[in-house]
Amino acid sequence: GENVEQHPSTLSVQEGDSAVIKCTYSDSASNYFPWYKQELGKRPQLIIDIRSNVGEKKDQRIAVTLNKTAKHFSLHITETQPEDSAVYFCAASIRNTGFQKLVFGTGTRLLVSP
Amino acid sequence: DAGVIQSPRHEVTEMGQEVTLRCKPISGHDYLFWYRQTMMRGLELLIYFNNNVPIDDSGMPEDRFSAKMPNASFSTLKIQPSEPRDSAVYFCASSLSGTGRNQPQHFGDGTRLSIL
């Protein structure tokens, strides 16, 4: 069935270090992969997304890579800052009879220590 | 522009009571999604609509849960009767259907529901 696995579940880094979160998906027809950041008590907010016709996308300190053959994609955060501390969710699109939805990973709690 | 608007932000009620959660999607968006978030189960899709029509309600946990979208600017999620295990944060999200391309979902601030 439709499934997105996300690792690690928790990640602790020192300020200034890099952080990498990895996701794998099961549906080979998935073609859209957003990443959301959720701060404590807040709503998930889109931070970056990538489509299947692109292998990498970058926006300042964050980047996402996609390997369609292996069906995995990753979020990279460089020069981490304490305000990057949050839960990060990956997602993959599922297209069913012409309608679209997302399947979310289980989340990674990132803690950046000063 | 206003984002997705949900009400109430918090709801505390006793077991057995009816609960109604409300959502106003972003104007012009034709997809609306209802999610439930708990520590144990993460972010679960309950039901979604396209052009006000329910497309997939396979995530609705039980018949106690129902959702409607009477028009393009309003949707409700109802739980009747409510149970303590329904306690969670309920998010509504909306998106625009691109011409064959998936579009980002935009989330509301959620309703934190506590059933005593």
Image (spheres, coloured by chain):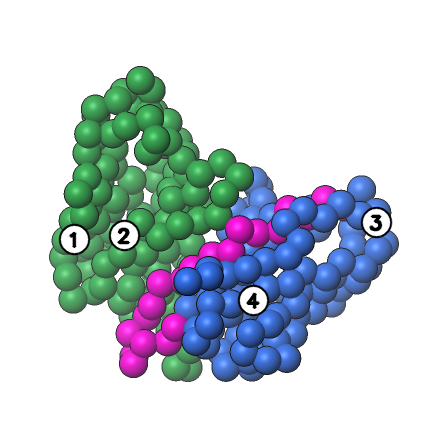
Chain colours: A green, B blue
Mark 3: which amino acid?
Met
**Res B57 visible:** no
- The residues bearing labels 1 and 2 have C-alpha atoms spaced at a distance of 8 Å
- The residues bearing labels 2 and 3 have C-alpha atoms spaced at a distance of 40 Å
Count up the numbered dots. Answer: 4
- Which quadrant would the N terminus of chain B be assigned to in this image? bottom left
What secondary structure is marked by label 1? strand
- The residues bearing labels 4 and 3 have C-alpha atoms spaced at a distance of 26 Å
The residue that label 2 is drawn on is A48
Few, some or many C-alpha atoms within 10 Å of disc 4 (few <14, some 14-19, many ≥20)? Answer: many
What's the magenta region? Answer: B96-115
Few, some or many C-alpha atoms within 10 Å of disc 3 (few <14, some 14-19, many ≥20)? Answer: some
* CB contact under 8 Å: marks 4 and 2: no
Q: Nearer the viewer, mark 4 or mark 3?
A: 4
Question: First in sequence: mark 1 or mark 2?
Answer: 2
Task: Reply yes or no: does residue B97 show up in magenta.
Answer: yes
Residue B48, x across and y down, in percent: 53, 70
Question: First in sequence: mark 4 or mark 3?
Answer: 3
